[in-house]
Image (tube, rainbow, N blue to C red):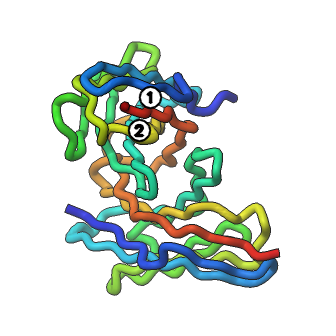
Amino acid sequence: DAGVTQSPTHLIKTRGQQVTLRCSPKSGHDTVSWYQQALGQGPQFIFQYYEEEERQRGNFPDRFSGHQFPNYSSELNVNALLLGDSALYLCASSLTRGLRSGNTIYFGEGSWLTVV
Amino acid sequence: AQTVTQSQPEMSVQEAETVTLSCTYDTSESDYYLFWYKQPPSRQMILVIRQEAYKQQNATENRFSVNFQKAAKSFSLKISDSQLGDAAMYFCAYRSGGADGLTFGKGTHLIIQP
């Protein structure tokens, strides 16, 4: 059973560029969340997708956007990259069946983004 | 907004001994969940243990147990019989019962001395 998979593993972008990160949830999971983890910090919640819609959003600007596809996979897009966007981006999936849930959240290994 | 505080940036313990990692949180909600995640150098977050706020009994998973003090808003993790493989960053996390976004603390770096 494949867990949460993310791509690419590492990438380097130039300030002002745009980046797309991809995530495939654990088999059977229908909900995907994205987190940003800066060096030496805990992850910060960006947003969550369920039924192809953004359901909850953390304190991140509109430069951060996402999408969920019918097969539950997801993309995170970041526009107009800033040096401060350099971080590990973690994707997490869960089986939600609605927004109230205590279901376990599983994480991928992340995508390292360096902005230069 | 909820906050999670881990006051120990780093902890060190001898192999086979017991260590306790501290976590406090702030919330006005009554329905929530608490978690401890382990992040080894591979960077993948691995769930160690979870606690539902409505349950009075402390959660236990093999060598890992929690001390959940709801009134004090404290959620500490005890690791018994520490093993070299336990070395990692440990994050305490909070999730509201009505939403699935996790709020993490800054983490505690656990070092296991052989």
Residue A33, quarter of the rendered image: top left
Q: Secondary structure at mark 2?
A: loop
Q: Are marks 2 and 1 in contact (CB under 8 Å)?
A: yes
Q: Quadrant of residue B37?
A: bottom right
Q: Which quarter shows the C terminus of chain B?
A: bottom right
- Disc 1 marks which amino acid? Asp
Residue indicated by mark 2: A96
Give the amino acid at mark 2: Thr
Where residue A6 appears, as percent x and y from the top left, is 53, 27
At 59% from the left and 58% from the top, the residue drawn is: B38
Instruction: Read off the chain for label 2.
Output: A
Q: Is residue A51 above or below residue B17?
A: above
Q: On the same chain: label 2 and label 1?
A: yes
Percent across and percent down for residue A41 are 41, 57
Helix, strand or loop for disc 1? loop
Residue A66 visible (yes or no):
yes
- Residue B29 occupies which quadrant of the picture? bottom left
- Name which residue lies at 76% across and 83% down: B17
Disc 1: CA contacts within 10 A as few (<14), some (14-19) or many (>=20): many
Residue lying at 47% horizontally and 47% vertically, measured from the top left: A103
**Chain of the residue where label 1 is placed in the rendered structure:** A
Label 2 packing within 10 angstroms: few (<14), some (14-19), many (20+): some
Q: Is residue A60 above or below residue B110?
A: above
The picture places residue A47, in percent across and down from the top left corner, at 29, 37
Nearest to the observer: residue A89 or residue B3 = A89
- Distance between the alpha carbons at the discs numbered 2 and 1: 7 Å
Please indicate whether residue B28 sits to the left or right of residue B87 in the image. Answer: left
Q: Which mark is residue A30?
A: 1
Location of residue B74 with respect to B105 vertically, above or below: below
Q: Quadrant of the N terminus of chain B?
A: bottom left
Q: Does A76 sit left or right of B108 as displayed?
A: left
Residue B57 shows in the view = no
